[in-house]
Image (tube, coloured by chain):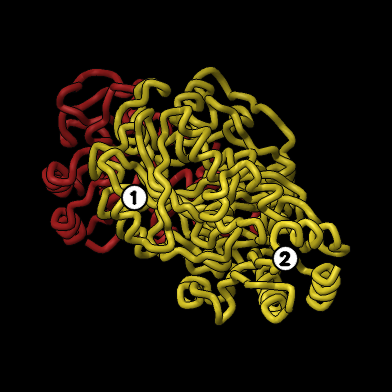
Amino acid sequence: MPPLTYPDTLILRILNETTTIAMAGASANWVRPSNFAMKYLQQKGFRVIPVNPGSAGDLIHGETTYARLADIPDRFEMVDIFRNSDAAGAIVDEAIGIAPEKGIKFIWMQLGVRNDEAAARAEAAGLIVIMDRCPKIEFGRLHHELGWAGVNTGVISSKRPRLRL
Amino acid sequence: MTEDHDDRQMNEFGFETRSIHAGAAPDPATGARNTPIYQTTSYVFDDVDHAASLFNLQTFGFIYSRLTNPTVAVLEERVASLEGGRAACAAGSGHAAQFLAFFSLLSPGDEFLVSKNLYGGSITQLGVSFKRLGWNAIFVDGTDPENFRRAMTPGCKAIFLEPLANPGGVVIDVETVAAIAHEAGIPLICDNTMATPYLWQPIQWGADIVIHSTTKFLSGHGTSMGGVVVESGKFDWNQNDKFPTMTQPDPAYHGLTFYETFGDFGFTMKARAVALRDFGPAMAPMNAFMTITGIETLPLRMDRHVANAQKVAEFLEDHPAVDWVSYAGLSSSPYRDLAEKYLPKGAGSVFTFGLKGGFDAGVRFVEACQLLSHLANVGDTRSLILHPASTTHRQLTDDQREAAGAGPEVMRISVGLETADDIIRDLDQALCA
Protein backbone atom coordinates (compact mmCIF):
# COMPACT_ATOMS: atom_id res chain seq x y z
CA MET A 1 0.00 0.00 0.00
CA PRO A 2 1.31 3.48 -0.78
CA PRO A 3 2.16 5.58 2.29
CA LEU A 4 -0.55 7.95 3.42
CA THR A 5 0.08 11.67 3.18
CA TYR A 6 -2.05 14.39 4.75
CA PRO A 7 -1.46 18.14 4.42
CA ASP A 8 -0.50 19.85 7.68
CA THR A 9 -3.37 22.26 7.09
CA LEU A 10 -5.91 19.40 7.16
CA ILE A 11 -4.47 17.94 10.37
CA LEU A 12 -4.50 21.38 12.01
CA ARG A 13 -8.08 22.02 10.91
CA ILE A 14 -9.22 18.73 12.43
CA LEU A 15 -7.43 19.41 15.71
CA ASN A 16 -8.78 22.99 15.81
CA GLU A 17 -12.39 21.90 15.14
CA THR A 18 -12.34 19.12 17.74
CA THR A 19 -13.22 19.69 21.38
CA THR A 20 -14.27 16.17 22.42
CA ILE A 21 -12.72 12.85 21.39
CA ALA A 22 -14.17 9.37 21.90
CA MET A 23 -11.15 7.09 22.30
CA ALA A 24 -11.98 3.51 21.27
CA GLY A 25 -9.61 1.05 22.92
CA ALA A 26 -8.51 3.43 25.69
CA SER A 27 -6.61 1.51 28.36
CA ALA A 28 -6.51 2.08 32.11
CA ASN A 29 -2.92 0.70 32.16
CA TRP A 30 -0.70 3.75 32.35
CA VAL A 31 2.15 2.32 30.24
CA ARG A 32 -0.15 1.70 27.25
CA PRO A 33 0.10 4.16 24.35
CA SER A 34 -3.64 4.96 24.51
CA ASN A 35 -3.28 6.00 28.13
CA PHE A 36 -0.36 8.28 27.16
CA ALA A 37 -2.33 9.87 24.34
CA MET A 38 -5.43 10.37 26.48
CA LYS A 39 -3.56 12.15 29.24
CA TYR A 40 -1.64 14.36 26.79
CA LEU A 41 -4.74 15.38 24.87
CA GLN A 42 -6.55 16.21 28.12
CA GLN A 43 -3.62 18.46 29.08
CA LYS A 44 -4.00 20.26 25.75
CA GLY A 45 -7.63 21.07 26.51
CA PHE A 46 -9.46 18.25 24.73
CA ARG A 47 -12.12 16.25 26.54
CA VAL A 48 -11.34 12.56 25.93
CA ILE A 49 -14.04 9.96 26.64
CA PRO A 50 -12.70 6.38 26.92
CA VAL A 51 -14.52 3.55 25.14
CA ASN A 52 -13.62 0.00 26.16
CA PRO A 53 -16.12 -2.82 26.88
CA GLY A 54 -13.71 -4.44 29.34
CA SER A 55 -13.52 -1.30 31.48
CA ALA A 56 -17.09 0.01 31.13
CA GLY A 57 -18.08 2.09 34.14
CA ASP A 58 -14.47 2.55 35.30
CA LEU A 59 -12.81 5.96 35.49
CA ILE A 60 -9.73 6.60 33.33
CA HIS A 61 -8.05 9.96 33.97
CA GLY A 62 -11.28 11.14 35.59
CA GLU A 63 -13.60 10.20 32.71
CA THR A 64 -16.21 7.41 32.78
CA THR A 65 -15.49 4.58 30.34
CA TYR A 66 -18.30 3.42 28.03
CA ALA A 67 -18.69 0.03 26.35
CA ARG A 68 -19.75 1.42 22.97
CA LEU A 69 -19.70 4.76 21.15
CA ALA A 70 -23.52 4.79 21.21
CA ASP A 71 -23.51 4.63 25.01
CA ILE A 72 -21.75 8.01 25.31
CA PRO A 73 -24.42 10.52 26.38
CA ASP A 74 -22.56 13.60 25.07
CA ARG A 75 -21.59 14.78 21.62
CA PHE A 76 -18.05 14.27 20.25
CA GLU A 77 -16.48 15.40 16.98
CA MET A 78 -13.75 12.74 16.72
CA VAL A 79 -13.49 8.98 17.10
CA ASP A 80 -9.84 8.02 17.80
CA ILE A 81 -9.33 4.28 17.23
CA PHE A 82 -6.71 2.42 19.29
CA ARG A 83 -7.64 -1.04 17.96
CA ASN A 84 -6.07 -3.23 15.27
CA SER A 85 -6.84 -2.55 11.62
CA ASP A 86 -9.48 -5.31 11.32
CA ALA A 87 -11.32 -4.32 14.48
CA ALA A 88 -11.35 -0.71 13.30
CA GLY A 89 -13.91 -1.57 10.61
CA ALA A 90 -16.78 -2.28 13.04
CA ILE A 91 -16.01 0.84 15.07
CA VAL A 92 -16.08 2.96 11.92
CA ASP A 93 -19.46 1.46 10.96
CA GLU A 94 -20.83 2.18 14.41
CA ALA A 95 -19.58 5.76 14.14
CA ILE A 96 -21.18 6.21 10.71
CA GLY A 97 -24.55 5.07 12.12
CA ILE A 98 -24.59 7.64 14.91
CA ALA A 99 -22.62 10.44 13.24
CA PRO A 100 -25.52 12.89 12.76
CA GLU A 101 -26.88 12.30 16.27
CA LYS A 102 -23.49 12.66 18.00
CA GLY A 103 -21.96 15.33 15.78
CA ILE A 104 -19.10 13.06 14.61
CA LYS A 105 -17.01 14.71 11.85
CA PHE A 106 -13.67 12.95 12.04
CA ILE A 107 -12.46 9.33 12.17
CA TRP A 108 -8.87 9.00 13.29
CA MET A 109 -7.03 5.65 13.22
CA GLN A 110 -3.88 5.39 15.29
CA LEU A 111 -0.28 4.69 14.27
CA GLY A 112 -0.19 1.29 12.57
CA VAL A 113 -3.98 1.19 12.14
CA ARG A 114 -5.21 1.31 8.56
CA ASN A 115 -8.45 0.03 7.05
CA ASP A 116 -8.96 1.45 3.57
CA GLU A 117 -12.40 -0.15 3.08
CA ALA A 118 -13.74 1.29 6.31
CA ALA A 119 -12.22 4.66 5.42
CA ALA A 120 -14.02 4.62 2.08
CA ARG A 121 -17.35 3.91 3.82
CA ALA A 122 -16.77 6.76 6.28
CA GLU A 123 -15.81 9.19 3.52
CA ALA A 124 -18.91 8.21 1.56
CA ALA A 125 -20.89 9.14 4.67
CA GLY A 126 -19.28 12.58 4.69
CA LEU A 127 -16.70 11.98 7.42
CA ILE A 128 -13.03 12.98 7.19
CA VAL A 129 -10.62 10.10 7.83
CA ILE A 130 -7.00 10.09 9.02
CA MET A 131 -5.17 6.75 9.28
CA ASP A 132 -1.82 5.57 10.66
CA ARG A 133 -1.25 8.75 12.65
CA CYS A 134 -1.44 9.70 16.33
CA PRO A 135 -3.28 12.92 17.31
CA LYS A 136 -0.90 13.36 20.24
CA ILE A 137 2.14 13.22 17.97
CA GLU A 138 0.51 15.40 15.31
CA PHE A 139 -0.57 18.01 17.88
CA GLY A 140 2.94 18.06 19.32
CA ARG A 141 4.49 18.23 15.84
CA LEU A 142 2.37 21.15 14.63
CA HIS A 143 2.65 23.11 17.90
CA HIS A 144 6.46 23.06 18.01
CA GLU A 145 6.70 20.51 20.84
CA LEU A 146 7.84 17.39 19.01
CA GLY A 147 11.07 19.05 17.92
CA TRP A 148 11.96 19.29 21.61
CA ALA A 149 12.48 15.53 21.42
CA GLY A 150 14.62 15.81 18.29
CA VAL A 151 11.83 14.78 15.92
CA ASN A 152 11.75 16.20 12.40
CA THR A 153 8.47 18.13 12.52
CA GLY A 154 8.58 19.31 8.93
CA VAL A 155 7.51 22.75 10.11
CA ILE A 156 9.38 25.84 8.87
CA SER A 157 8.06 29.25 9.86
CA SER A 158 9.48 32.72 10.52
CA LYS A 159 6.53 33.52 12.83
CA ARG A 160 6.91 33.46 16.60
CA PRO A 161 5.30 30.21 17.79
CA ARG A 162 2.26 30.49 20.01
CA LEU A 163 2.61 27.47 22.24
CA ARG A 164 -0.46 25.70 23.62
CA LEU A 165 1.09 24.56 26.87
CA MET B 1 -3.86 27.45 6.02
CA THR B 2 -3.04 29.37 9.16
CA GLU B 3 -0.44 32.12 9.27
CA ASP B 4 1.92 29.85 11.20
CA HIS B 5 2.08 27.07 8.70
CA ASP B 6 3.29 27.13 5.17
CA ASP B 7 1.16 24.65 3.26
CA ARG B 8 4.19 22.81 1.94
CA GLN B 9 5.55 19.77 3.72
CA MET B 10 9.15 19.96 4.90
CA ASN B 11 10.52 17.72 2.18
CA GLU B 12 9.47 20.32 -0.37
CA PHE B 13 11.87 22.89 1.06
CA GLY B 14 15.34 22.84 -0.48
CA PHE B 15 18.45 21.62 1.28
CA GLU B 16 19.85 25.14 1.67
CA THR B 17 16.60 26.40 3.22
CA ARG B 18 16.52 23.52 5.68
CA SER B 19 20.21 24.05 6.54
CA ILE B 20 19.21 27.47 7.86
CA HIS B 21 15.68 26.99 9.18
CA ALA B 22 14.91 23.37 10.06
CA GLY B 23 14.28 22.96 13.78
CA ALA B 24 14.55 26.67 14.51
CA ALA B 25 11.82 29.23 15.01
CA PRO B 26 11.76 32.65 16.66
CA ASP B 27 12.03 32.26 20.43
CA PRO B 28 8.46 31.98 21.79
CA ALA B 29 9.16 34.19 24.80
CA THR B 30 11.30 36.97 23.31
CA GLY B 31 10.97 36.78 19.55
CA ALA B 32 14.76 36.41 19.25
CA ARG B 33 15.27 35.30 15.66
CA ASN B 34 18.47 33.31 15.99
CA THR B 35 18.41 30.30 18.29
CA PRO B 36 19.28 31.36 21.85
CA ILE B 37 21.95 29.47 23.76
CA TYR B 38 19.92 27.88 26.54
CA GLN B 39 22.87 27.56 28.94
CA THR B 40 20.50 25.91 31.40
CA THR B 41 20.38 22.61 33.21
CA SER B 42 16.78 22.27 34.39
CA TYR B 43 13.22 23.38 33.78
CA VAL B 44 10.33 24.07 36.17
CA PHE B 45 7.28 21.82 36.40
CA ASP B 46 3.84 23.43 36.35
CA ASP B 47 2.67 21.07 39.06
CA VAL B 48 3.24 17.53 40.28
CA ASP B 49 1.06 16.01 37.59
CA HIS B 50 2.99 17.85 34.84
CA ALA B 51 6.23 16.54 36.36
CA ALA B 52 4.86 13.00 36.36
CA SER B 53 3.75 13.31 32.73
CA LEU B 54 7.19 14.52 31.69
CA PHE B 55 9.05 11.79 33.55
CA ASN B 56 6.69 9.15 32.15
CA LEU B 57 7.23 10.51 28.59
CA GLN B 58 3.48 11.12 28.39
CA THR B 59 4.03 14.70 27.30
CA PHE B 60 6.78 16.59 25.48
CA GLY B 61 8.91 19.08 27.34
CA PHE B 62 12.13 19.77 29.14
CA ILE B 63 13.22 18.26 32.45
CA TYR B 64 16.99 18.26 32.59
CA SER B 65 19.61 19.02 29.95
CA ARG B 66 21.18 15.57 30.18
CA LEU B 67 18.05 14.42 28.30
CA THR B 68 16.91 17.40 26.25
CA ASN B 69 17.91 21.04 25.93
CA PRO B 70 16.16 23.66 23.79
CA THR B 71 19.33 24.61 21.87
CA VAL B 72 20.48 21.02 21.39
CA ALA B 73 16.97 20.11 20.19
CA VAL B 74 17.26 22.58 17.30
CA LEU B 75 20.44 20.85 16.16
CA GLU B 76 18.80 17.42 16.45
CA GLU B 77 15.83 18.36 14.33
CA ARG B 78 18.03 20.14 11.78
CA VAL B 79 20.30 17.15 11.20
CA ALA B 80 17.29 14.81 11.08
CA SER B 81 15.80 17.02 8.37
CA LEU B 82 18.99 17.27 6.30
CA GLU B 83 19.50 13.50 6.39
CA GLY B 84 15.88 12.89 5.39
CA GLY B 85 15.34 11.14 8.73
CA ARG B 86 12.48 11.05 11.20
CA ALA B 87 14.30 12.03 14.40
CA ALA B 88 17.72 12.48 15.95
CA CYS B 89 19.46 12.42 19.30
CA ALA B 90 22.64 14.42 19.88
CA ALA B 91 25.59 13.41 22.04
CA GLY B 92 28.80 14.94 23.32
CA SER B 93 30.91 13.45 20.51
CA GLY B 94 30.67 11.16 17.52
CA HIS B 95 31.94 8.28 19.61
CA ALA B 96 29.25 8.95 22.21
CA ALA B 97 26.65 8.94 19.43
CA GLN B 98 27.91 5.55 18.27
CA PHE B 99 27.63 4.24 21.80
CA LEU B 100 24.01 5.45 22.05
CA ALA B 101 23.11 3.72 18.79
CA PHE B 102 24.67 0.38 19.65
CA PHE B 103 23.46 0.35 23.26
CA SER B 104 19.93 0.88 21.99
CA LEU B 105 20.17 -2.17 19.70
CA LEU B 106 22.46 -4.75 21.25
CA SER B 107 22.45 -7.09 24.21
CA PRO B 108 25.51 -8.92 25.56
CA GLY B 109 26.40 -11.79 23.22
CA ASP B 110 25.08 -10.06 20.09
CA GLU B 111 27.16 -9.66 16.95
CA PHE B 112 27.33 -7.01 14.25
CA LEU B 113 29.18 -6.69 10.95
CA VAL B 114 31.57 -3.81 10.40
CA SER B 115 33.31 -2.59 7.29
CA LYS B 116 37.08 -2.52 7.87
CA ASN B 117 37.40 0.83 6.16
CA LEU B 118 36.85 3.01 9.18
CA TYR B 119 38.23 5.86 11.22
CA GLY B 120 40.89 4.25 13.44
CA GLY B 121 39.16 5.37 16.62
CA SER B 122 36.03 3.52 15.54
CA ILE B 123 37.98 0.34 14.85
CA THR B 124 39.16 0.40 18.46
CA GLN B 125 35.82 1.44 19.94
CA LEU B 126 33.80 -1.17 18.05
CA GLY B 127 36.38 -3.94 17.99
CA VAL B 128 37.97 -3.70 21.44
CA SER B 129 35.99 -1.58 23.90
CA PHE B 130 32.56 -2.80 22.77
CA LYS B 131 33.79 -6.37 23.11
CA ARG B 132 34.08 -5.84 26.88
CA LEU B 133 30.33 -5.12 26.89
CA GLY B 134 29.64 -8.37 25.03
CA TRP B 135 28.96 -6.65 21.69
CA ASN B 136 31.02 -8.56 19.17
CA ALA B 137 32.14 -6.85 15.97
CA ILE B 138 32.88 -9.00 12.92
CA PHE B 139 35.11 -7.03 10.54
CA VAL B 140 34.76 -7.57 6.82
CA ASP B 141 36.20 -5.94 3.71
CA GLY B 142 33.28 -3.68 2.85
CA THR B 143 34.56 -2.79 -0.61
CA ASP B 144 32.84 -5.98 -1.82
CA PRO B 145 29.24 -5.90 -0.52
CA GLU B 146 28.95 -9.68 -0.85
CA ASN B 147 31.43 -9.99 2.02
CA PHE B 148 28.65 -8.85 4.34
CA ARG B 149 26.37 -11.64 3.10
CA ARG B 150 29.16 -14.20 3.51
CA ALA B 151 29.91 -13.08 7.08
CA MET B 152 26.27 -12.86 8.23
CA THR B 153 25.41 -14.91 11.33
CA PRO B 154 22.04 -15.59 13.01
CA GLY B 155 23.14 -13.45 15.96
CA CYS B 156 23.98 -10.40 13.80
CA LYS B 157 21.92 -7.36 14.75
CA ALA B 158 23.32 -4.65 12.46
CA ILE B 159 25.77 -3.70 9.71
CA PHE B 160 27.95 -0.67 10.33
CA LEU B 161 30.01 1.21 7.74
CA GLU B 162 31.30 4.60 6.61
CA PRO B 163 29.83 5.27 3.13
CA LEU B 164 32.72 7.60 2.29
CA ALA B 165 35.40 6.05 4.45
CA ASN B 166 38.00 7.78 6.58
CA PRO B 167 40.85 7.98 5.80
CA GLY B 168 41.16 6.18 2.49
CA GLY B 169 38.93 7.83 -0.13
CA VAL B 170 36.96 4.56 -0.31
CA VAL B 171 33.30 4.58 -1.41
CA ILE B 172 31.05 1.73 -0.23
CA ASP B 173 28.13 0.51 -2.35
CA VAL B 174 25.51 1.45 0.26
CA GLU B 175 22.44 0.50 -1.78
CA THR B 176 23.67 -3.08 -2.20
CA VAL B 177 24.75 -3.43 1.43
CA ALA B 178 21.38 -2.06 2.60
CA ALA B 179 19.60 -4.76 0.59
CA ILE B 180 21.79 -7.44 2.22
CA ALA B 181 21.03 -6.03 5.69
CA HIS B 182 17.30 -5.93 5.01
CA GLU B 183 17.27 -9.50 3.67
CA ALA B 184 18.72 -10.50 7.04
CA GLY B 185 16.12 -8.37 8.85
CA ILE B 186 18.67 -6.03 10.40
CA PRO B 187 19.36 -2.29 10.07
CA LEU B 188 22.22 -0.65 8.17
CA ILE B 189 24.03 1.97 10.28
CA CYS B 190 26.13 4.53 8.39
CA ASP B 191 28.66 6.96 9.81
CA ASN B 192 28.17 9.79 7.32
CA THR B 193 30.68 12.19 8.86
CA MET B 194 32.99 12.33 5.84
CA ALA B 195 30.31 12.99 3.19
CA THR B 196 27.80 15.10 5.18
CA PRO B 197 24.17 15.06 4.06
CA TYR B 198 24.96 17.74 1.49
CA LEU B 199 27.06 15.31 -0.55
CA TRP B 200 25.30 12.02 0.30
CA GLN B 201 22.13 11.07 2.18
CA PRO B 202 22.47 7.35 2.98
CA ILE B 203 18.82 7.02 4.07
CA GLN B 204 17.84 7.64 0.43
CA TRP B 205 19.84 4.52 -0.44
CA GLY B 206 18.41 2.31 2.29
CA ALA B 207 20.35 3.16 5.46
CA ASP B 208 18.25 2.93 8.62
CA ILE B 209 20.41 4.81 11.10
CA VAL B 210 22.93 7.56 10.33
CA ILE B 211 25.59 8.72 12.76
CA HIS B 212 27.71 11.86 12.63
CA SER B 213 30.63 13.33 14.39
CA THR B 214 29.26 16.87 14.14
CA THR B 215 32.74 17.99 15.23
CA LYS B 216 33.79 17.75 11.58
CA PHE B 217 32.10 19.37 8.56
CA LEU B 218 28.74 20.04 10.22
CA SER B 219 30.17 22.40 12.82
CA GLY B 220 32.87 23.01 10.25
CA HIS B 221 35.21 25.42 12.00
CA GLY B 222 37.14 23.23 14.42
CA THR B 223 35.36 24.72 17.43
CA SER B 224 32.88 22.26 18.88
CA MET B 225 32.72 18.60 19.79
CA GLY B 226 29.50 16.74 19.09
CA GLY B 227 27.74 13.75 17.63
CA VAL B 228 24.27 12.78 16.52
CA VAL B 229 22.26 9.63 15.78
CA VAL B 230 19.53 9.94 13.13
CA GLU B 231 16.86 7.29 12.51
CA SER B 232 15.10 6.95 9.18
CA GLY B 233 11.77 5.97 10.73
CA LYS B 234 11.44 3.26 8.09
CA PHE B 235 12.84 0.18 9.85
CA ASP B 236 10.21 -2.30 11.12
CA TRP B 237 11.55 -3.42 14.48
CA ASN B 238 8.68 -5.92 14.79
CA GLN B 239 9.59 -7.92 11.66
CA ASN B 240 11.50 -10.52 13.73
CA ASP B 241 12.49 -11.19 17.33
CA LYS B 242 15.99 -9.70 17.00
CA PHE B 243 15.25 -6.36 18.68
CA PRO B 244 13.71 -6.90 22.11
CA THR B 245 15.17 -3.56 23.22
CA MET B 246 12.66 -1.91 20.85
CA THR B 247 9.70 -4.29 20.92
CA GLN B 248 9.54 -5.65 24.48
CA PRO B 249 8.59 -3.77 27.66
CA ASP B 250 11.72 -1.99 28.91
CA PRO B 251 12.56 -2.65 32.57
CA ALA B 252 14.67 0.54 32.53
CA TYR B 253 11.49 2.49 31.76
CA HIS B 254 8.64 1.06 33.84
CA GLY B 255 7.77 -1.51 31.20
CA LEU B 256 7.33 0.97 28.37
CA THR B 257 7.53 -0.54 24.87
CA PHE B 258 9.34 2.08 22.80
CA TYR B 259 8.42 0.99 19.26
CA GLU B 260 4.73 0.56 20.05
CA THR B 261 4.50 3.83 21.96
CA PHE B 262 6.54 6.14 19.71
CA GLY B 263 6.35 4.38 16.37
CA ASP B 264 8.71 5.70 13.74
CA PHE B 265 10.76 7.73 16.24
CA GLY B 266 10.84 4.99 18.88
CA PHE B 267 14.53 4.30 18.35
CA THR B 268 15.42 7.92 19.02
CA MET B 269 13.26 7.99 22.14
CA LYS B 270 14.96 4.81 23.33
CA ALA B 271 18.44 6.23 22.67
CA ARG B 272 17.55 9.39 24.58
CA ALA B 273 15.38 8.13 27.44
CA VAL B 274 17.55 5.12 28.28
CA ALA B 275 21.06 5.33 26.78
CA LEU B 276 21.59 9.10 27.06
CA ARG B 277 19.77 9.26 30.41
CA ASP B 278 21.68 6.40 32.01
CA PHE B 279 25.17 6.96 30.59
CA GLY B 280 25.08 10.73 30.36
CA PRO B 281 27.13 11.82 27.29
CA ALA B 282 24.99 14.90 26.60
CA MET B 283 26.02 17.62 24.15
CA ALA B 284 26.80 21.06 25.61
CA PRO B 285 24.30 23.79 24.56
CA MET B 286 27.15 26.08 23.48
CA ASN B 287 28.49 23.36 21.18
CA ALA B 288 25.01 22.84 19.75
CA PHE B 289 24.78 26.58 19.03
CA MET B 290 28.15 26.63 17.29
CA THR B 291 27.16 23.59 15.25
CA ILE B 292 23.78 25.02 14.27
CA THR B 293 25.57 28.16 13.08
CA GLY B 294 28.06 26.03 11.14
CA ILE B 295 25.33 24.04 9.40
CA GLU B 296 23.74 27.22 8.06
CA THR B 297 26.66 27.49 5.61
CA LEU B 298 27.23 23.76 5.07
CA PRO B 299 26.16 23.79 1.38
CA LEU B 300 28.45 26.72 0.55
CA ARG B 301 31.38 25.29 2.47
CA MET B 302 31.06 21.78 1.04
CA ASP B 303 31.01 23.09 -2.53
CA ARG B 304 34.33 24.86 -1.88
CA HIS B 305 35.79 21.96 0.11
CA VAL B 306 35.26 19.54 -2.77
CA ALA B 307 36.44 22.04 -5.41
CA ASN B 308 39.67 22.62 -3.47
CA ALA B 309 40.07 18.88 -2.81
CA GLN B 310 39.79 18.11 -6.50
CA LYS B 311 42.53 20.64 -7.36
CA VAL B 312 44.81 19.41 -4.58
CA ALA B 313 44.29 15.74 -5.50
CA GLU B 314 45.14 16.45 -9.14
CA PHE B 315 48.27 18.36 -8.09
CA LEU B 316 49.44 15.54 -5.81
CA GLU B 317 48.83 12.86 -8.43
CA ASP B 318 51.33 14.60 -10.73
CA HIS B 319 53.94 15.25 -8.04
CA PRO B 320 57.20 13.23 -8.33
CA ALA B 321 57.42 12.60 -4.55
CA VAL B 322 53.92 11.11 -4.45
CA ASP B 323 53.45 7.41 -5.18
CA TRP B 324 49.66 7.33 -5.31
CA VAL B 325 46.53 9.36 -4.46
CA SER B 326 43.33 7.76 -3.21
CA TYR B 327 40.59 10.28 -3.93
CA ALA B 328 37.32 9.08 -5.40
CA GLY B 329 37.06 12.23 -7.49
CA LEU B 330 40.07 11.23 -9.61
CA SER B 331 39.60 9.25 -12.81
CA SER B 332 42.35 6.91 -11.55
CA SER B 333 40.27 5.93 -8.51
CA PRO B 334 38.70 2.44 -8.48
CA TYR B 335 35.78 4.10 -6.68
CA ARG B 336 35.14 6.68 -9.42
CA ASP B 337 31.97 4.95 -10.66
CA LEU B 338 30.53 4.61 -7.16
CA ALA B 339 31.41 8.25 -6.49
CA GLU B 340 29.54 9.32 -9.62
CA LYS B 341 26.49 7.40 -8.41
CA TYR B 342 26.47 8.39 -4.75
CA LEU B 343 28.51 11.62 -4.64
CA PRO B 344 27.64 13.63 -7.74
CA LYS B 345 28.43 16.94 -5.99
CA GLY B 346 31.94 15.79 -5.08
CA ALA B 347 33.82 13.05 -3.25
CA GLY B 348 34.46 14.95 -0.03
CA SER B 349 37.64 16.72 0.96
CA VAL B 350 39.41 14.11 3.09
CA PHE B 351 41.63 11.63 1.32
CA THR B 352 44.94 9.85 1.47
CA PHE B 353 48.09 9.76 -0.60
CA GLY B 354 51.28 7.71 -0.38
CA LEU B 355 54.81 9.10 -0.28
CA LYS B 356 57.52 7.30 -2.20
CA GLY B 357 59.84 7.74 0.80
CA GLY B 358 57.66 5.70 3.21
CA PHE B 359 57.36 6.27 6.98
CA ASP B 360 60.38 8.55 7.35
CA ALA B 361 59.31 10.75 4.44
CA GLY B 362 55.87 11.02 6.05
CA VAL B 363 57.33 12.29 9.31
CA ARG B 364 59.55 14.82 7.47
CA PHE B 365 56.64 16.00 5.33
CA VAL B 366 54.15 16.73 8.14
CA GLU B 367 56.79 18.59 10.10
CA ALA B 368 57.70 20.75 7.07
CA CYS B 369 54.16 22.03 6.43
CA GLN B 370 53.78 25.75 7.18
CA LEU B 371 50.17 26.49 6.21
CA LEU B 372 48.62 23.04 6.65
CA SER B 373 48.15 22.15 10.31
CA HIS B 374 49.56 18.90 11.67
CA LEU B 375 46.72 17.63 13.87
CA ALA B 376 44.15 14.86 14.32
CA ASN B 377 40.90 16.26 12.99
CA VAL B 378 39.11 16.66 9.69
CA GLY B 379 36.43 18.95 8.33
CA ASP B 380 37.85 22.30 9.42
CA THR B 381 37.97 25.53 7.40
CA ARG B 382 41.75 25.11 7.78
CA SER B 383 43.61 22.50 5.74
CA LEU B 384 44.85 19.70 7.96
CA ILE B 385 47.51 17.06 7.48
CA LEU B 386 48.18 13.87 9.37
CA HIS B 387 50.45 10.85 9.22
CA PRO B 388 47.98 8.21 10.50
CA ALA B 389 50.59 5.49 11.09
CA SER B 390 52.32 7.64 13.70
CA THR B 391 49.15 9.15 15.26
CA THR B 392 45.46 8.13 14.93
CA HIS B 393 46.16 4.58 13.79
CA ARG B 394 49.21 4.06 15.99
CA GLN B 395 47.42 1.68 18.40
CA LEU B 396 46.42 -0.72 15.61
CA THR B 397 48.32 -3.73 14.36
CA ASP B 398 50.13 -3.54 11.01
CA ASP B 399 47.35 -5.64 9.45
CA GLN B 400 44.64 -3.37 10.86
CA ARG B 401 46.51 -0.30 9.60
CA GLU B 402 46.80 -1.75 6.10
CA ALA B 403 43.13 -2.77 6.12
CA ALA B 404 42.11 0.72 7.21
CA GLY B 405 44.23 2.31 4.48
CA ALA B 406 46.76 3.70 6.96
CA GLY B 407 50.03 2.05 6.01
CA PRO B 408 53.47 3.58 6.85
CA GLU B 409 53.70 5.74 3.71
CA VAL B 410 50.13 7.07 3.93
CA MET B 411 49.31 10.73 4.52
CA ARG B 412 45.78 11.95 5.25
CA ILE B 413 44.75 15.41 4.16
CA SER B 414 41.59 17.36 4.98
CA VAL B 415 41.46 20.08 2.36
CA GLY B 416 40.15 23.34 3.82
CA LEU B 417 38.76 26.56 2.45
CA GLU B 418 41.95 28.56 1.93
CA THR B 419 42.96 29.70 -1.56
CA ALA B 420 43.63 26.44 -3.41
CA ASP B 421 46.94 27.70 -4.84
CA ASP B 422 48.20 28.49 -1.33
CA ILE B 423 47.41 24.95 -0.14
CA ILE B 424 49.17 23.53 -3.17
CA ARG B 425 52.23 25.77 -2.70
CA ASP B 426 52.62 24.64 0.92
CA LEU B 427 52.29 20.98 -0.03
CA ASP B 428 54.85 21.42 -2.79
CA GLN B 429 57.49 22.97 -0.52
CA ALA B 430 56.90 20.34 2.19
CA LEU B 431 57.15 17.49 -0.32
CA CYS B 432 60.50 18.89 -1.47
CA ALA B 433 61.82 19.43 2.06
CA neighbours of label 2 inside 10 A, class few (<14), some (14 to 19), many (20+): some
Look at the picture and state if B123 lies above or below B150: above
Which label belongs to residue B145?
none
Look at the picture and state if A116 lies above or below A145: below
Residue at 58% in and 44% down? B396
Residue at 52% in and 50% down? B399
Question: Which residue is disc 2 drawn over?
Answer: B357
CA neighbours of label 1 inside 10 A, class few (<14), some (14 to 19), many (20+): some
Q: Which chain is yellow?
A: B
Q: Horizontal and vertical percent for residue B322? A: 70, 73
User: Label 1 is found on which chain of the structure?
Assistant: B
Q: Horizontal and vertical percent for residue B298? A: 66, 64
Look at the picture and state if A58 lies above or below B207: above
Q: Are marks 1 and 2 in contact (CB under 8 Å)?
A: no
Distance from disc 1 to disc 2, alpha carbons, whole Å, reads 48 Å
Q: Which chain is red?
A: A
Question: Which residue is disc 1 drawn over?
Answer: B235
Please identify the residue farthest to the right as the structure is shown.
B370
First-in-chain label (1 vs 2): 1
Q: Is residue B294 visible?
A: no
Q: Secondary structure at mark 2?
A: loop
Q: Horizontal and vertical percent for residue B190? A: 47, 53
**B254 and B192: which is toward the camera:** B192
* B246 lies left or right of B60: left
User: Label 2 is found on which chain of the structure?
Assistant: B
Q: Secondary structure at mark 1?
A: loop
Placement of the C terminus of chain B among the 4 image quadrants: bottom right
* B395 lies left or right of B319: left
**B413 and A146: which is toward the camera:** B413
Q: Is residue A116 visible?
A: yes
Query: Looking at the picture, which amino acid does disc 2 mark?
Result: Gly
